[in-house]
Amino acid sequence: MKKINHLYSLTPEWQQQLVQEIKGKLIDDKIIVIPETLGKGHSYFTPVAEGISVLFVDFVLTEPVEINRLKSDEESYIFHFDLSDSVNSIKIDRADYKIGSHKNPGLAIIDNQTESSFKPSVNERTLALRLLVDKKLLNELLETTAVGEFQKQENKLEQKSLYYYDNIDSNSVLLIRSLMDKSVFELSFDSYLKGISLKLLGNFLNRYENLSAKKNDITDTELEAVIKTQDYFLKDLCNPFPTINFLSEMAGMSSTKYKMLFKKHFNDSPKKLFLKEKMILANKLLQSGNYSTLIEIVYELSYTRMNHFHSKYYAVFQRKPSEDFVKKTYRKMSRRAPQVVT
Amino acid sequence: MKIIEHSYCADLSWVKPLARKLKGKIKDNFIIVPEDIQSGTRYFLECEDGIVAYYINVKYYKNLHFVQKNSKNDFIGFYYDLTDGEVRLAANNTICDLGRWKYNLAVIDGTLKTNYQIKSGSHTYALCIFVHKSKLAAFIKDDTVLFSDLQKITDPKKNTIIRYDRISNESFHILNDLRKLKVGGPVFDLHLKATVHMLMSNYLKKIARNRIIIQTVKESDIQNIIAMQMFLIENIEGPFPSISLMAKKVEMSESKFKNLFKKITGLTPNSFFMNNKLALAKELLEDKQLTISQISSRLHYSNNSHFTLNFKEHFGLSPRSFIKQL
């Protein structure tokens, strides 16, 4: 196996050494054409903005190669996006990571100050995009976007040299794929690649900003249906609880899904919410003074046994119903009666 | 009609006077304009030395007349204007209606004085890019190939260029993506810079392939083709209306219609239609409000697998895996 050593920097100088080693051709300080002894393809490197550079590689190798990236003094992160047809492996600090193809995660973030080696598979198309981002710049960006999640991950993995290992988000995949059918030798490629690079970084930051925010998976129509059922059973609290089966049918979904969505949105199960509301109503009725006996209220609320109501009420208010009960008074009647006489 | 005299240039010195003229103020990178004139966002950003982007997404409540008189003439302005409403741009004795369904790209040299009139009630979404001429020259000289068209731009003797054009479908979607984002903050800045790069790339590609033919085609033909583009977008959820139907609508022969459509938009009617249909499908998937099968039936696909196949062919990713990694 042929071994190639190189190191990265944010400026294009590093390419010279690599070109000499593989005996390739360097065009314009940007494009490296891989010699036919190794395979077919090219890489494209360009600085994008201050602190950001991008390397785009697209090749098919005919010979197994191990590309060693040596330690660099420059403090930067490498974002490795891999969209290759088959699995490639990256070795970082003696740990192997599989990357590329559909099954494996396609994004790895590596520190430029640790060594890694990249082994692309032979006779398959390797398509990868590497963003080099200055550490200071990335930290600034992370601070301003309040990306707690990323930093948590970072801390956890501090001992390991791989900072992050995940799938690429779909929009970024589409962006990188759109590079596939562009020719690197075209005039417009340069600015297109720059644009893509910035977007990828933007997407990455966006994604981690959104991760910390609560995800809302409920669609509007489903939510509407669930709220409708809630309105329905809160309207007549006096009746017994309509079954979950009935409610889920009303919402047009399976009972499991219904319960799940309900709980997600209201933080309580339908039955519990119903009971809570019912007991609040019971409390109102008790204190209204419109009833002369407790049993009237119990029947009003469709309970068949006093004991049952008692225990439910106690569970919510930690008080007995009788303690809150205000008895109906007949004072008004007695006052009216003499008036009739006179 | 309120007349506002202002200037642009490839650095940020034009911002303050413009804000003052609009009776607004500057906060961070926003220009905040009183609500009785317009509502919405105006955002400016210096992308790099010599390239300034100016993002406008506003609704006007007054008829305005912008007069652009530049003190510096060392830049070229690219105005991507997707206005719904009435906008008229007059420069150098030419008058032209701008907007999403009219001309939506104007490339104007900084030496020219322009009049930009907009009617109350119009909703403007525009991105203006001001590029210093030396920067533009560098864009080209970076590469080994020199294009006569671009040389003309940077040639000081012939530098009073003005061009109206229609942006490509691809550029339109790039702009549309930008519109969805929340304005402000470093992430938006990244996206804005990226958009500028990608638009410039598309424009360069267009020049390189000599695709600026729009001024060589008869005015009425352009109008007809744009009308048909509009017709396709309006019926984007339905099946593809046949070529013969559209040709009949604009009173052309089928082959003439097809040729002109391709010439002006760079795409065949069907691929224009499918591109936009799938872009819509992608947007719907991103919204997460509908399931894949709901989307496919909404877009009048006869079955799911046909939709999936189409989607995969276009984006290289199946709808299912697209949703999974959003």
Image (spheres, grey):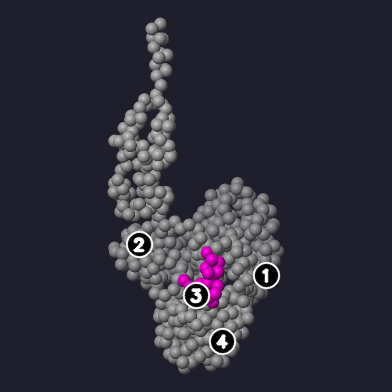
Residue A159 included in the magenta stretch of the image:
yes
Q: CA distance from mark 1 to mark 4?
A: 42 Å
User: Residue A6 shows which numbered tag?
Assistant: 4
Q: CA distance from mark 2 to mark 4?
A: 46 Å
User: Residue B292 shows which numbered tag?
Assistant: 2
SS label for mark 3: strand
Comparing A13 with B196, the one in front is A13
Residue A165 against residue B36 in the figure, above or below: below
Contact between marks 3 and 2 (CB within 8 A): the answer is no
The stretch in magenta equals: A149-166
Q: CA distance from mark 4 to mark 3?
A: 19 Å
Any part of residue A225 in sight: yes
Q: Are marks 3 and 1 on the same chain?
A: no
Residue A314 included in the magenta stretch of the image:
no
Which residue is disc 3 drawn over? A108
The mark lying in front, picked from 2 and 4, is 4
